Image (cartoon, grey):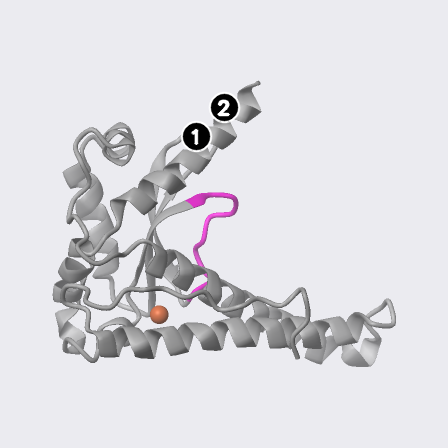
Amino acid sequence: MSNDRSYQAKEFNLSGLNGISDRTLEMHFKLYEGYVKETNKLTEKISEFLADGKVDQDEVPAYSELTRRLGFEYNGMVLHEYYFGNMKQQGSGDPGKASNFVKAAETSFGSYDIWKADFVGIGKMRGVGWAICYENPTNGRLSNHWITLHETGNVAGFNPVLVMDVWEHAFLLDYKPAERPKYIEAFFSNIDWDACEKRLQKGTTARSSAAK
Ligand SMILES: [Fe+2]
């Protein structure tokens, strides 16, 4: 059931990426739409429990289970939007040396190359999840994190700047399971660094308005 509180799947025009096929993207968009639908469905079901203004004792097990699932579906929806949103056709590989991202990486890690070694290292970790570079909005510092599934490891209140899906569905039509490093290389060649700069800018704006 859809209402004015429900989410709509966003559209991303990414065909023709380097090393990530259109077939993979089409399948991936469908999976993403599934997260949007499930987020809406769970929200609706939970609201039915709340319709009488309370959670009855006999409703607690079902209510709890749906609420636990909501974290998985919600993060699945949002992280895919960040992921698709930080790629583009003819991406630029590495960011410009004068970019705010490179400056933030130098301040936080010593150099962009060290930042990248950490981010790629996380992306190669065994398991099902994501590599995410976050900005701490209070001080502008970057840190890289491993997220298990979609919901375990996200840092509350931090600003996702670069988000990389490393679930096998992100690359299995193009590479073997053991070839994740090749997918990561392809992902880097498609990064939309302008999108990452805009995300960083959001953190900078939040800091400057908090300082006033
Ligand atoms: Fe995915």
Q: Does the CB distance between marks 1 and 2 fall below 8 Å?
A: yes
Bin the neighbour count of mark 2 within 10 Å (Cα to Cα): few under 14, some 14-19, many 20 and up: few
Q: Amino acid at mark 1?
A: Thr
In the rendered view, would you say 112 is above or below 59?
A: above
What whole-number distance in Å separates the C-alpha atoms at marks 1 and 2?
Answer: 6 Å
Which mark identifies residue 208?
2
Q: Is residue 94 left or right of residue 32?
A: left
What residue is shown at x 25% (from left), y 55% (from top)? 122
Q: Nearer the viewer, residue 156 or 73?
A: 73
SS class of the residue under badge 1? helix
Magenta region: 150-159
Q: Nearer the viewer, residue 135 or 63?
A: 135
Q: Is residue 62 left or right of residue 36?
A: right
Locate the C terminus by quadrant: top right
Query: Which residue position holds label 1?
Result: 204
Q: Quadrant of residue 124?
A: bottom left
Instruction: Give the percent coordinates (x, y) of residue 53.
Output: 86, 67
Dominant secondary structure of the residues highlighted in magenta in the image: loop
Q: Amino acid at mark 2?
A: Ser
SS class of the residue under badge 2? helix
Locate the N terminus by quadrant: bottom right
